[in-house]
Image (spheres, coloured by chain):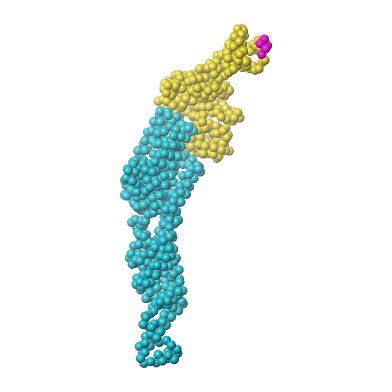
Chain colours: A yellow, B cyan
Amino acid sequence: MIEVTDLVKKYGTHRAVDGVSFTVGRGELFGLLGPNGAGKTTTIGVLSTLLKADGGQVRIGGHDVASSPAQVRRLIGVVPQEIALYTDLTARDNLMFWGRLHGLGGAALSRRVEELLVMADLADQAKRRVDAYSGGMMRRLNLVAGLIHEPEVLFLDEPTVGIDAQARSRILDLIAQLGRQGLTVIYTTHYLEEAEHLCDRIGVIDRGRLVALGDKESLISQIGDVDLIRLSLPEGERAAFAAECGAWPECAGVGERRGKVEIRTPDGGRLLPRIQDWLRAHDLPLEQLEIERPNLETLYLNLTGRGLRENGS
Amino acid sequence: MTRLWVFAARDLRRMANDRRALVINLALPLLLTSIMGLSFGGGIFGKKGISAIPVALVAGELPDALRDRLLAGLQESGFFAPVWADSAQADALVRSGDVAAAIVLPDDALKGFFQSDSLSVAVWKDPSSEVKAGIVEEIVRRGVLRVQAGEAAYRALWPDDYRISTGDSAAVADLFAGGLDEIWRNLRDPDAVDSRKRATEFLARAMDHQVALSRALSEPQVGLTIADRIPVAAEDGRESSLFDYFLPSFAVFFLMFAVAGGARDLHRERTRRTLQRQLLGPGSAWPVVVGKWAASVVQGVVMLSVLLLAGALLFRVNLGPDPWTLPVVVVLTCTAASGFFMLLALLVRREKVLDNLSTAVILVSGMLGGNFMPVDNMPEWMAAVGRFFFNYWANLSFARVIGDNGSLTAVGTPLTVLATASAVLLVAIVVLFRLRVRRGGWA
């Protein structure tokens, strides 16, 4: 359904998207994972015809985005990161406007608007102005506004930013429901758990480059079955510990990050006694120790040296 | 066209929902123009202040002494600025609006009155000066009532220095001098036949006057006729006041703020991403910006119409010689204003910059384009510079239509300039918007 080949988008000399390639099959829920500033929104901008690419090719439903933007627009719906609604109008007026914009009218439009209000669980609030809504209600309305013309492909650009856990859960349920209905979805987020929970396949993007691509299991297998141990130590002791730990057979790698020593090991449980012995030998208390099983965060960390919530710029 | 209307209708609905904008764009200008109307256009429903009401007096053959006393009395009252006029002059003065009313006595008013004929006093009023003419009418009506009560008749008959003739009174005085025996002798004196005859005539005439007095007291002999004189202005010109200039020029000034706000909304839509969402719809991008322009035009037309109609209703501001000239001026003013500020919005990249720039442009063009002083009174250099601003041509058009009661032909040149500017600006905003969208700068 979507083919992206060597996509490049530059702002001046800065390459916001730098040679990104991926494909998304019909009915697939594809996650684009990366921190702020990684190039996710720019990628969506080009895919949705709003931005012109400086290189590469994008085809959606067989249409080239650059040469046939009108045909592409008929196929796609976009839910921007911002609340792109008229907050001085009611929910119904908003949906009616977006529907008319897409050429809908009469009973068909009214019917579609009611469907979407029910889908967003806003039917009883339809006559209220949007500026009286909670953040979660606005997000749900923002999402269904992108569905008014029944697109085949939906771009969701961080649709859960700035809302509480409960509201986020309702949004994710809504997206999962859309996925089950066969809609092709590209979902950008910097929330790892959302991508893990929702997406069939995930592309990890950093500094404009796609650094990993695949389903969750295959991505995690890229870093192998390795535990990550984070140990808090006084600054003067870290180097000595790292030197000694690196020589232990159970240790697959050791480094320092954010004031902690990070140790990769195939079996965290076997390494713990050694660490305790070392602390006792050096007369140091055990202040903090975490063991993390491999996940996308670990993968991202391994690939980029940064966490997903850190600013990518 | 349907898409264009979708965009315009959306903006109009939002404008109607925006109570703050309604207050700023409609209520506030209405309040300020009302204050100006009261200051420069006279009281509500009137044209000028109520002091020193100009009034014409037509009194035919009234004796000079009485004319002088009447004139002095009116002047001393402090309410009137009276002028004498003959019938034709008074008619012209009322019709031209130079006097609020004329008080017209018939040529033989005094003579007729004392001959016990009924007397008709007329008041000719300028209908456009309702308050002042009404005051004149009321005062005359009161005067007539007093005459009807006999007071005026008594004063006319028995003033302190009243004499039917000096000789007659002397004869009476001679006749009635001394005691009763002397009066008796005088009445029988054969040498005083002439004196007796004159005294008798005097007494007989005095009796006549008494009869006239009692008739005046018993039945009204003075009638009052009130007649409006249609001002000349309503036919081929009219009286204008400073408010006739200030109303449209301030309306245009407020219009500029209103349409600048509409243009600023383009930037707000961009930052809120509703603009980008619209650009994802099917079809061309131009209806997005033209729809916003059209909504801004409608908003401006409503705003100007309300202000001008309020001015006409409250302060009798002239709305032109026919029903179509002023609406054409209003619409072309709004199309040019909306185009101008929409272009400004497309030329800058940030809303904050647009805010500052719009305010500066409104103030400068307001000054140079004749929003703070009548275009006809502008210094030559200012008028020359002002020609580069649409509001100069708008103000000029309003001055010709409202101030001079000019028709479409009288405003041909400024309307042509406004229409051309509107068309050029509309094309410019479409081209620039498409360019911005194509280059991705507005995405």
Task: Identify the main secondary structure in magenta.
Answer: loop
Q: Residue at x 39, y 82 (%)?
A: B169
From the top left corner, tell me how far across and down residue A102 is, in percent.
Answer: 46, 34
Residue A198 sits inside the magenta stretch: no
Q: Quadrant of residue B430?
A: top left
Q: Quadrant of residue A124?
A: top right
In the image, B79 versus A225, the foreground residue is B79
Q: With respect to residue B29, does A201 lie above or below?
A: above
Q: Residue furthest front?
A: B178
A312 sits to left or right of B102? right
Q: With respect to residue A97, does A67 lie above or below?
A: above
Q: Quadrant of residue A196?
A: top right
Q: Residue at x 44, y 37 (%)?
A: B356
From the top left corner, tell me how far across and down residue B300 is, in percent.
Answer: 42, 44
Q: Can residue A301 be spotted in the picture?
A: yes
Tell me which segment is drawn in magenta: A280-284
From the top left corner, tell me how far across and down residue A22 is, in percent.
Answer: 48, 19
Q: Residue at x 55, y 39 (%)?
A: A128
Q: With respect to residue A95, does A275 lie above or below?
A: above
In the image, B309 versus A112, the foreground residue is B309
Q: Residue at x 55, y 28 (%)?
A: A161
From the top left corner, tell me how far across and down residue B332 is, in percent.
Answer: 37, 44
Q: Can residue B416 be spotted in the picture?
A: no
In the image, B168 versus B361, the foreground residue is B168
B209 sits to left or right of A88? left
B108 sits to left or right of B26? left
